[in-house]
Amino acid sequence: MDVELKMVRNTLVVRVNGELDMVVAEKMHREIDERMEKGEVKNLILNLEKVSFIDSSGLGVIISSYRKIAAVNGRMYMAGARPNVKKILILSGVNKLIPIYDSEQEIISI
Amino acid sequence: MNVKNYVRFEFQSLPENISFARSCVGAFASQLDCTLDDIEEIKLVVSEAVSNSIIHGYENNPHEKVVIVVSIMDDNTLEIIIEDYGKGIEDIEKAMEPTYSTDPSRMGLGFTFMKSFMDEVDVISKPGKGTTVKLRRNFAAADKEAYA
C-alpha cells in the first residue's frame, strides 16, 4: 500500500510508503478528500518515515491537504521525514506552514 | 567539450513512467564521481521536467511521447535533455518564476528546483510544437573545491 489512512479520534493519520511523486500524490489526494468529505477529520498527521523521494507534485498534495485542514480550523503535522525529503520540505518552505517532528509519537505527546 | 558516454530513451507520457525516467537518469549519472545527495538532486530535476511535460505539455494525455538524452562530457559535465512535442510554453520567463503555475493546484516549483540543483537550465519552446529543457551540471568543480 502506497497510502495508508487511519482515524485516531478526530485526527487522520496518513502513512505514505515509497516515492511521493505525481502517481502517489494523486492517490493521496483522492483518499484524503474522501475522508475529509465525511466531515470527521479535524487534524492531520502525515507520516513520511517510509517516503524515499518527494517532488513538487508531492509538495502540492501536502499543501492542498494543509489548506483543507486550515479551512476547518484544524492542525496539520508531518513526522519522520528522511534527510533528503526534509531538505526539499525546507527548501520549498512547506515546513514554515506545517511543523516537522521526528515521529508520530512525538506529535501525539505534545 | 566531447561526449564521453550517452543514453537516449523515450517513453509514453504516463505518470507511471516518471519514476522510471528519474531512476534511469540517476543510475546513468552514478558513473560520475558524485554523492548520493547529488544523485537525489538529479532524480528530482528529472522528475520535475518530465512531470511538466506530462501535465502541462500534454495536459495529461497519456498517448504522447517524452524523449530523454543524458550525456556525460569529458570534463565531467552531466547534460540532460528532456523533450516533448506538446503545446509548448507561451511565456518562458513567466513559467520560470518561483511559484508560478498555470494550474492553481500546483506549487510552481519545478523550474525553481531545476535552477537550484543544476548549473545551467535552458528552455526552448514553441507554442504548438513542444518544449526542450536542457539541464547541465559540472561535477568536476566540486572536486576542485574539495582539494583547494
Image (cartoon, rainbow, N blue to C red):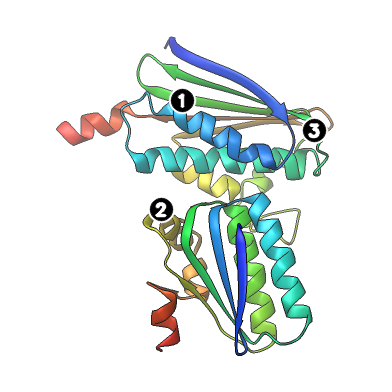
Coordinates of residue A92 in the picture (x, y in percent): 50, 60
Assess disc 1: are there few (<14), some (14-19) or many (≥20) residues with their C-alpha within 10 Å of its C-alpha. some
Q: Which residue is mark 2?
A: A84
Residue at left offset 41%, top offset 37%: B39
Please say if B95 is above or below B141: below
Question: Residues under labels 1 and 3: Cα distance?
Answer: 26 Å
Which mark, by number, is residue B86?
3
Q: Earlier in the sequence, mark 1 or mark 3?
A: 1
Q: Count the marks.
A: 3
Q: Quadrant of residue B21?
A: top right
Q: Quadrant of residue B2?
A: top left
Residue at left offset 40%, top offset 88%: A109
Nearest the viewer among A90 and A16 is A16
Three-letter code for the amino acid on which mark 3 is drawn: Gly
Return the chain for callout 1. B
Coordinates of residue B67 in the picture (x, y in percent): 67, 24
Mark 1, secondary structure of its residue: helix
Coordinates of residue A97 in the picture (x, y in percent): 52, 75
Residue at left offset 44%, top offset 76%: A104
Please say if B45 is above or below B80: below
Residue occupying the far left of the picture:
B148
Which mark, by number, is residue B108?
none
Return the chain for callout 2. A
Q: Are marks 1 and 2 in contact (CB under 8 Å)?
A: no
Q: Which residue is mark 1?
A: B28
